[in-house]
Amino acid sequence: MEPQSVDRVERLFADHARAVRAYALRRVDPATAEDVVSDVFVVAFRRLEDVPEAALPWLLATARKIIANYRRAAGRREQLNLELRSLQSGAWSDPPGGAGAVLSGLARLSEGDREVILLVAWEELSPEDAAEVLGCSRAAFAVRLHRARRRLAAVMGREQRSERFPRRLSEVTSE
Amino acid sequence: MSDLLDSVRAANPVPWCEQPSVERVWSKLERDQPGAGEQTGAGASTHARRAARGTWRGRVDRRHLGSGSWPRGPVAALLIAAASAAAVVLLGVGRPSGIAGGAWPQPGQPSAAVQRLVRGTISCDFGATGATVSVSARGRSAIVFCRNRYRTLSHAGAGTTFVACETSATNVAVYVADGRHRQCARLGDRALPAGYAAAVRRAQPHSAALSPADPGTAVSI
């Protein structure tokens, strides 16, 4: 490994570590997120020749796989703990005002649908880059995004309806 | 539909985060080294090769000195004097009982076990191909020292891989790698502790400034 490889990893880190960390923090608890970040750049260091010039999608795709590995390795019970930890101590526990319904709707989506939406909305990737993260074509990504948005709208619509109904019911019973 | 995406954007729980430290990556690379704690040459881990080629020092130079070259004149003299003073503190030179006596004053410094190894002895065991050399470590990298000694002893050093193992609390042994995993364990030794390479890296510039041409004291050959 040449010294310039070390320099390149450090440049990659300086340019993209924050985005990778944010990506991880949005999906796992803070302690795991730190591990994910270092794992991503360890992989980048070892597979430097595979890292493209526009590296962020590659790094996020690696982070995605590493998070999946963490969850697999944790096993079913541990996975539940991991998710609970991320919900309790992570960023999801303190959503911005009025965001509860959106987060709740996102949580009800399948992981695939959720990832498609979040790559665009939270990671602010272009459709091309997001497609690269997921390893699909841009056209396939567009279709997946369209379907995921429709499902999210449906889930949120159902939630709003179910919220309204008990409110009216309580109003009736209190009168 | 775009309103929906906007509301998802607004619900982003981590709109911004701080830049993490790259040091975690390098520490992880150190920890993840398979088998031995430190290897160089063909087949060695990338991190070990990187350390062996002095890129750590290059990186430190660029950060603290602004360029890869060593400054000349009075500035260099001042820096060497400062480095020497730091070496006295870090390595406990002239203070034999300083191992556990707070010679690493800052928090987050290497553990006492690592310090003992860094200040202990290095044994270069070249097996059937040559002699065994033991020297006082003085903060030097065991691999680098033994590789140089291997070349000095006229072995074909280029492309040879070495493995460093912990044989006792104060001794690091270096062997010619056999190319298989867990060589240290198979030899009855332990892999070097995770912080060893970092501690050597930290101590090495000070040690070099203190005695740049000191080959170490040969205990047995």
Image: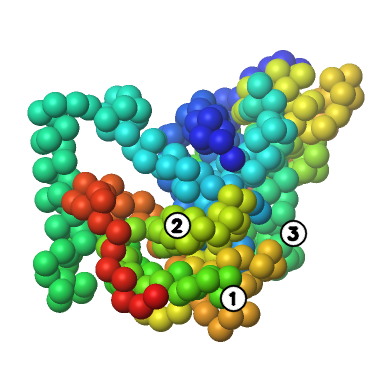
Decide: few, some or many residues near mark 1? Use Cα within 10 Å; few <14, some 14-19, many ≥20: few
Residue at 55 percent across and 65 percent down: it is B163
The number of numbered discs placed on residues in the rendered structure image is: 3
- Tell me how far mark 2 sits from mark 3, CA to CA: 50 Å
x and y percent of residue B99 in the render? 21, 72
Camera-side residue: A17 or A163?
A17
Decide: few, some or many residues near mark 2? Use Cα within 10 Å; few <14, some 14-19, many ≥20: few
Query: How is the rendered protein coloured?
Result: rainbow
Residue at 12 percent across and 70 percent down: it is B95
Residue at 59 percent across and 76 percent down: it is B128
Which structural element holds mark 3? Answer: helix
Pointer 1 residue: B128
Looking at the image, can residue B45 be seen?
no
Decide: few, some or many residues near mark 3? Use Cα within 10 Å; few <14, some 14-19, many ≥20: few
Q: Are marks 3 and 1 in contact (CB under 8 Å)?
A: no
Question: Which amino acid type is marked by label 3?
Answer: Arg
